[in-house]
Image (spheres, coloured by chain):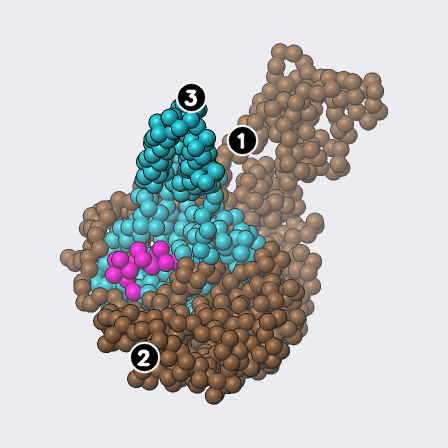
Amino acid sequence: MKLSLNWIKDYVKIPDDMDLTRLAYDLTMSTVEVEGAENLADQFKNIVVGEILEVLPHPNADKLRVCKVNVGTEDIKDIVCGGSNLEAGMKVVVACPGAMVRWHGEGDPVEIKNAKLRGVQSFGMICAAVEVGLADLFPASDDHEIMDVTAFDAKAGTPLADALDLNDIILEIDNKSMTNRPDLWGHYGIARELAALYDLPLVEFDPFVPNVSEVYDVRIEDTERCQRYIGAKIEGLGVKPSPFLMQSRIWRVGMRPINALVDITNYVMLAVGQPTHVFDSDHIIDHISVRRAGEGEKLQLLNDKDISLVSDDLVIADAEGAVALAGVMGGAKDSVLPTTDSVILEIANFESRGVRRTAQRYDNRTEASSRYEKAIDAERCDQALSLAMKLFAELYPDMKLVAFNDVYPHKTKRAEIDVELDWLERRLGKRIPEEVISKKFGIMGYDVSFTEDMMHIVVPTWRSTGDVSEKCDIMEEVARMYGYENFEATTITTSFDSAINQLDYDLTRKVKEYLAFRSGMQEIFTYPWMSDECVSAIMPSTDGILALATPPSPTEKYVKCSLLPNICRAIVKNERNFDEFDIYEESLVFIDKNYTEKYKGEALPTQERHLGCAFVAKTEDIQSLYRHAKGIIAAMPSYTHMEGFTFTRDEKPFWADDVVWQNICLNGKRIGDIALLSKKSALTAGIKVVSAVLVELNIDEFVPFRSRTNKFTHLAEYPINDYDISFLVDSMVKFEEIYTAAMEKAKGGLLRGVSFVDEYKGKQVPAGKKSVTIRLAVGSDEKTLTSQEIEEVANGVMKKLQKTFGAERR
Amino acid sequence: MKEKLEALLREGTAKIEAAASEAELQEVKVLLLGKQGSVTELLKEIPKLDVALRPEMGKAVNNVKNLLSEQIEGRRETLKLKASEIAPDFDFTLPGTTPKIGGLHPITQMCYDLNDAFRSMGFEVFSGPEITSEYYAFDNLNFPPNHPARESMDTYWLEGHDSGEANEKLCLRPHLTGDSVRYMQTHKPPYRFVYPGRVYRNETTDARHERAFFQYEALIVDKDFTYTAGKVMIKSILQKVFGKDVPVRMRAGFFPFVEPGFEIDMGCLVCGGKGCSVCKHVGWIEIMPGGTPHPNVLRAAGLDPDEYTGFYVNIGLDRLVMMRYGVDDVRLFHSTDLRFLKQFR
């Protein structure tokens, strides 16, 4: 919202020497965020009033003229201009060299320089209104019309800003910072805050007393939605422009002046925050009623939009039908028309939520509706009435109030709050003197009375529509008016019960750090929704998958039930730039089942914390890729302090390659899978060149050890020897079978362990066979073994392998 | 012969001294004392000499042979102790072979930094469900039905769960504050906890707006906690995260679930408060809203607002990370683009 400081000064006498930066800062700290404070005149630097003395033809151009112009300097300047309305004696706007103007009102402002135009030297430029940003105040009748300021009694050379009285500070307020303050949506509200901040008197509005006996017929049918309606029939008017100052003020704060009748209503709204409206009284048949619309009732709005109403809409109607959408917009037919000479002035209070619903329903938020939405107090109609009648009288000395009515079924009740002074002191950490509170609160419109240990507050109506209702609200008022910066910092005290011990949090963090820092993987984040093609790559069906009612795009409606679809998408994205990468994501997934009530009053679907990984490479060597992935997963529990995983082969995941897959189990329970993404799924997801081993684990199933579980064993007294043996075996035999068979030899003997060294298929190995090398750890607790004893152990293992698999030693 | 012998000794000594490695020395040794070495060749010539000269010359040649042998052994010892075995063209400027480097997401990094800071002050870390009921998203957080703020947080409702009572309507959480009630309902006061997480809003995206973004909320609830203590808390946290003292100011702000509410600004780190384009020339950057939990929120958690109060902040993690590193497009965080993510260690 924009505010004019000059306008604010109508209501509160801010000292002229007030530092503007200070004012903006104080308002920001205590009330609303001031985003900018600029002098309007700054836009008009080097722009002055010039008087045309003579208009001569241009020697080289038919459409251009050379004007002799007095711009207040000693010499008369030549200015080349193509304006259609140039005349000697006319006062015009001259942009001198250095001024910023927008050529024909388009593009960014450019700096004016001395230039030759078609061979004639021109000093600056004679401007059209649009070129100096004043088209709203000086509408041109054609594109070549020059802005005429003859009517302003200004000497040649007067800066334009002075001539038009545009020396004003415009404050730009962040609307978001005052959504809770319906009282601030006008100049008077901010004036009141400034008065309280600086202990200055605030100008009051004189109550308007209607001296007319005729009662205008106003009927409020829905008193919940309309708490007050003032209808005033005024005659002796007519459509004409409003005075320049009124137009100028309306324009300064971002609205467009229209005509005197409409401008009065907008001026009142901008001044006190109360929307008002005028109807052409010749068009209002018999009476005004405020009622719900009939279903399907038609109304053409002021912006020419035709709408079909519903019964939730509140309308202003006459005997024949709806004439306005209450609190939102007037109707086209019955508002101010070119012929209007008498009006019905409406000053009314409409219920906030109803206005909001209607404005949204027709996608038609207006200056009025956005104010009503904030919940305005009904008493403010008095201020609006006072100001509006004053303005009508000023602008139309012959006007006559012929009928009046103020139907006021619901007065806004002033909230009353008791605050214990002791409580206030404890919460603020400081005792604020009673006289400070009384003074500030008095200016803000509160009635305050103190008893020994209590403060009784009666809240003004304009803060009683939901804004101030509890004692914490009063605490805020005290604190901000005293100044948040004026409270000394206090330390935080602590009471010690026990150390923070959050094993689950620590575990998840260890998992992520292990993958990132120990395993060289990059963490990624993806959205909670999945693309359809990635869903069909990973999921056998969409059963049990939750969907969004209004998804970000029609093909992204399903909500994550697995991390793998989005990981596939990340692979697609990155395979363009990288041949090899390992990524992971840790996130919740959602499944449409269970709906158990974990927290009071809500039953939610299953939400599990999952870990998804992708090990990606442009490679033919799937064996190595798979072992790389498996190695990282298998070693994780030793870093994260939990039981080790086991790898089984129970159920192939839908997306997995037929051969390369395993299930991952913890304490015998399947908690995830590791597998090569099948060719079909990869293609479905759009992965073009790389191979990917994917892993998904349910982290909720991870059980962290309560503490470290390391065990110490004495160091071996005699050496443990490594002994490698290589043998040929059927290529279908799996290492795990070899391991199990070999380890049978370990029972109570000298064999201490078996590990995998190498596997080879190729030229020197017959088809259908593979060469496997394993490493035996051989040792004794009693002595150092001889090489013959070690050899014997190896031979025993070899014999076992030969018997079991027909292995041949190489 | 005699001259020859002297020259040989001279040259031999020089060669031995010049040998830079044991291998070179070995070559020199072969050259001098080997089967076809210069000294050996001279010895071979002795029988051809006049008999009378033989003993003397033999002695002289042997003498030279012994001298050279000694020198060689001496040189060998020197080389062993002093020199490198490695050829001098070894390039020690080649880069090291690095282990494969991965990384946490920059948001996770910031979140963990904050967790560490808060945990050091006795805060617990809590996380709640991301699909929430309307009841926990709005109703028990002092958002009355039809409150405009509900619409300012355009919510992703779930298909088939987008109508009905507040406890039946389900959505992706539009903010984290519902978790504060969940925590308080299941724990005993006083409270001191943080609840970071991702929230979702159904809005149009651009460089500054995202549909999914991260918030970090912290809440203290205790008896008679003043908001000035909250300021101390914020200062301490920022100091820990940024590694230096950061000016903090609190000014009037409004959020439904706090009263009083604040906007909390930190001094711009880019310009040091002098004013620059990052802070829009005001020297301050808005980093978080905060305030005292609204009595209705405390009531929803089953607490008496006359007895308990507290302090709450909501830190926008995306913003904080963007500011810290100068990231200019919030959408990069969910881009999964490794060219972006790999920049943060």
* Residue that carries the numbered disc 3 in the rendered image: B3
In the picture as drawn, the residue positioned furthest to the front comes out as B51
Please tell me whether mark 3 or mark 1 is closer to you in this view. 3
Q: Residues within 10 Å of mark 3 (few under 14, many from 20)?
A: few
Residue A235 screen position, x and y as percent: 61, 51
Name the secondary structure under disc 3: helix
Q: Which chain is cyan?
A: B
Q: Chain of mark 3?
A: B
Above/below status of A14 relative to A771: above
Indicate yes or no whether the magenta region holds residue B115.
yes
Q: Are marks 3 and 2 on the same chain?
A: no
Query: Distance between the Cα atoms at labels 3 and 2?
Result: 73 Å
Residue B68 screen position, x and y as percent: 36, 33
* Residue that carries the numbered disc 2 in the rendered image: A750
Residues in magenta, as a range: B111-124
Depth check: A461 or A105 in front? A105
What residue do we see at 67% from left, 38% from top?
Answer: A107
What residue do we see at 53% from left, 78% from top?
Answer: A728
Name the secondary structure under disc 1: helix
Depth check: A635 or A61 in front? A635
Please tell me whether mark 3 or mark 2 is closer to you in this view. 3
**Residue A192 in sight in this render:** no
- The type of residue carrying mark 3 is Glu
What residue do we see at 37% from left, 84% from top?
Answer: A745
Q: Is residue B122 left or right of residue A305?
A: left
Task: Report the magenta stretch's main SS.
Answer: helix
* Residue that carries the numbered disc 1 in the rendered image: A42
Query: Distance between the Cα atoms at labels 3 and 1?
Result: 105 Å
- The type of residue carrying mark 1 is Asp
Above/below status of B314 relative to A802: above
